[in-house]
Image (cartoon, rainbow, N blue to C red):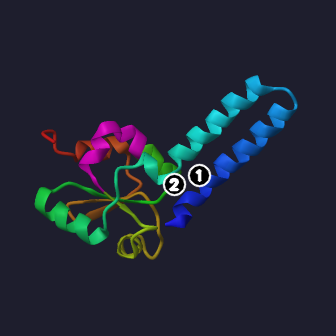
C-alpha cells in the first residue's frame, strides 16, 4: 500500500521545499500557486483519484453477475489516469482493481500480458485489452447504468 503513495508524497515534499525557498526569497505570490500545483499533481497521481478498489476475486464475481468490465490499474500510471479522467463519472460503472494492493490482481495482469504488469488492463467479457482507448471502454459500458 505504501508504494502507491510514494510519488504523491514526493510531489508534495518537493513542492513544499520549492515553495519555502520562494517564500524565503520574498516571492509568496509565486510560492503559493506553485505549491497548489504540486498538491494537485500529487492528488491526481494518488489512489484518491480513482474509484474505490476491490479485490480481483470480488471484481471477477461482480463482473460475472452484472457484466461490467474490470480495470486493473496502479497509482502513478499516467495511462490509468488518462483512462480515469476521460471516463469521467462513468468510471464508477467499472470494477477497479489496484494491482499494487491485490496480489491476485497483479497475477491476472501478468497472465494477460505475457508476464508483464502492463496497466491499465481492461477485461471485457473475459477478454483482456491492454491500454484501450477510453472511448472504446465507454462504448462497452451499459447505457442504462
Sequence order check, earlier mark of 2 and 1: 1
Q: Is residue 139 above or below residue 61?
A: above
Q: Position of residue 78 (x, y in %)?
A: 52, 49
Q: Is residue 3 highlighted in magenta?
A: no
Q: Dot 1, crowdedness within 10 Å: few (<14), some or many (≥20)?
A: many
Label 2: which residue?
Answer: 77
Residue nearer the viewer, 8 or 104: 8
Asked whether, in this view, residue 25 is left or right of residue 136, the answer is right
Q: Is residue 81 above or below residue 61?
A: above
Q: Position of residue 88 (x, y in %)?
A: 35, 37
Q: Is residue 57 above or below residue 43?
A: below
Residue under the point 74% across and 23% down: 29
Give the Cα separation between the discs numbered 2 and 1.
Answer: 12 Å
- SS type, badge 2: loop
Label 1: which residue?
Answer: 8
- SS type, badge 1: helix
Residue under the point 18% across and 62% down: 62
Residue 130 sits in quarter: bottom left
Residue under the point 31% across and 63% down: 54
Asked whether, in this view, residue 39 is left or right of residue 26, the answer is left
Residue 19, which numbered label? none
- Magenta stretch bounds: 84-95
Q: Position of residue 92 (x, y in %)?
A: 28, 46
Asked whether, in this view, residue 50 is left or right of residue 16, the answer is left
Amino acid at each position: 500500500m505504501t508504494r502507491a503513495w510514494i510519488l504523491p508524497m514526493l510531489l508534495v515534499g518537493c513542492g513544499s521545499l520549492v515553495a519555502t525557498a520562494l517564500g524565503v526569497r520574498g516571492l509568496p505570490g509565486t510560492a503559493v500557486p506553485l505549491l497548489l500545483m504540486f498538491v494537485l499533481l500529487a492528488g491526481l497521481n494518488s489512489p484518491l483519484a480513482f474509484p474505490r478498489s476491490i479485490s480481483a476475486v470480488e471484481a471477477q464475481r461482480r463482473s460475472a453477475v452484472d457484466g461490467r468490465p474490470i480495470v486493473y490499474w496502479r497509482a502513478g500510471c499516467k495511462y490509468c489516469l488518462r483512462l480515469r479522467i476521460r471516463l469521467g463519472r462513468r468510471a464508477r460503472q467499472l470494477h477497479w482493481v489496484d494491482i499494487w494492493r491485490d496480489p491476485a490482481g497483479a497475477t491476472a495482469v501478468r497472465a494477460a500480458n505475457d508476464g508483464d504488469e502492463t496497466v491499465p488492463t481492461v477485461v471485457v467479457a473475459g477478454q483482456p485489452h491492454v491500454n484501450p482507448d477510453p472511448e472504446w471502454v465507454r462504448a462497452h459500458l451499459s447505457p442504462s447504468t
